[in-house]
């Protein structure tokens, strides 16, 4: 409980410091109208509301990544097959899941992400390979939701509330820095939970963090993507085919995808070899 409390204090402290920057800057500027000062303060509150959730879910995501290999190795299962299934699931659902999020609703999609993560990390308690495999399929879906639904909700809500577009860069920059901080903290915190509760410890902590994020998301307002006038293009089946057709036809998508796949593949290969040397 003390560790979880420390996590929340760090997250809240980071968001409060970052969100106060723009409001403090506006109060020191000369010639800023009272209306604009009020808008800046409202933006600061909005950014804090979003960043608390964003940093919690990124911390939870990093905590899984740092110890998933260790957990599967302790179960004595085929680790490579589980990782391959997760990445393959993400690749299959990626081309159309963004459009599905726009149609279904960004807030609902964020809630679905949290529910999926709670289910996935509950399934991680099982040593049954088929159950773990099913969890990796869900993991591919949740990963796509993580990197589409949350930022889409924030961007649309930012504009809906009448904040200038140039302020978006501030939110993205804080999120980028915060994500890096959470990545560093995740390794330390996950190790503390593993030392206390065993290899499953970090995943139990992730369940608590994700449940907390879900409760905070329920306070958000819903928003959607632009609706299409062509009803045939709004079905999930049509979005699936359209997404894959776009992926195949645009060489830039393939170049970006191959670059990321090769870089991450090299990273996982090096990490695997390094871990095996340490264990040996």
Image: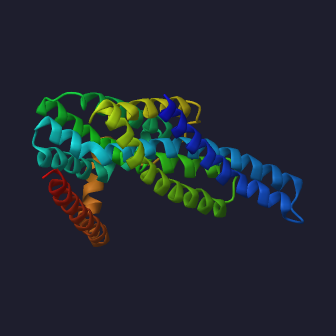
Q: Nearer the viewer, residue 141 or 23?
A: 23
Q: Is residue 100 above or below residue 111?
A: below
Tell me which residue sits at (63%, 45%) in the image: 13
Tell me which residue sits at (76%, 49%) in the image: 41
* Residue 234 position in % (x across, y down): 38, 44
Q: Is residue 152 left or right of residue 135?
A: right
Tell me, what colour scheme is on the image? rainbow
Q: Is residue 170 left or right of residue 205?
A: right
Tell me which residue sits at (30%, 51%) in the image: 94
* Residue 183 position in % (x across, y down): 42, 52
Image quadrant assignment for residue 121: top left
Tell me which residue sits at (39%, 37%) in the image: 113
| Figure label count | 0
Q: Is residue 167 left or right of residue 245?
A: right
* Residue 153 position in % (x across, y down): 52, 46
Q: Nearer the viewer, residue 272 or 132?
A: 272
Q: Nearer the viewer, residue 17 or 29?
A: 17
Q: Is residue 87 above or below residue 176?
A: above
Q: Is residue 6 left or right of residue 158?
A: left
The answer to whether residue 67 of the structure is visible from this angle is: yes
Q: Nearer the viewer, residue 101 or 134?
A: 134
Q: Is residue 174 above or below residue 67?
A: below
* Residue 190 position in % (x across, y down): 37, 42
The answer to whether residue 233 of the structure is visible from this angle is: no
């Amino acid at each position: 409980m003390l560790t979880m409390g420390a996590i929340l204090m760090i997250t809240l402290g980071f968001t409060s410091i970052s969100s106060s920057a723009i409001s403090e800057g506006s109060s020191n500027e000369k010639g800023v109208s009272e209306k604009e000062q009020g808008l800046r303060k409202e933006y600061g509150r909005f950014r804090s509301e979003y960043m608390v959730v964003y940093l919690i879910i990124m911390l939870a995501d990093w905590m899984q990544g740092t110890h998933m290999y260790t957990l599967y190795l302790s179960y004595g299962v085929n680790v490579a097959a589980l990782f391959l299934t997760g990445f393959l699931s993400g690749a299959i659902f990626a081309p159309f899941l963004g459009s599905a999020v726009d149609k279904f609703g960004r807030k609902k999609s964020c809630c679905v992400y949290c529910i999926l993560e709670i289910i996935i990390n509950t399934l991680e308690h099982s040593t049954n390979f088929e159950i773990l495999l099913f969890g990796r399929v869900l993991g591919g879906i949740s990963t796509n939701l993580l990197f589409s639904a949350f930022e889409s909700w924030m961007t649309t809500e930012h504009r809906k509330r009448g904040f200038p577009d140039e302020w978006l860069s501030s939110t993205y920059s804080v999120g980028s820095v915060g994500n890096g901080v959470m990545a560093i903290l995740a390794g330390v915190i996950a190790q503390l939970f593993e030392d206390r509760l065993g290899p499953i410890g970090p995943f139990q902590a992730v369940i608590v963090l994700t449940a907390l994020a879900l409760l905070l998301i329920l306070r958000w307002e819903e928003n959607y993507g632009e609706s299409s006038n062509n009803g045939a293009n709004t079905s999930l089946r049509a979005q699936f085919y359209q997404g894959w057709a776009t992926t195949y036809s645009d060489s830039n998508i393939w170049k970006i995808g191959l670059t990321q796949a090769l870089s991450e593949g090299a990273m996982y290969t090096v990490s695997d070899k390094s871990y095996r040397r340490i264990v040996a």
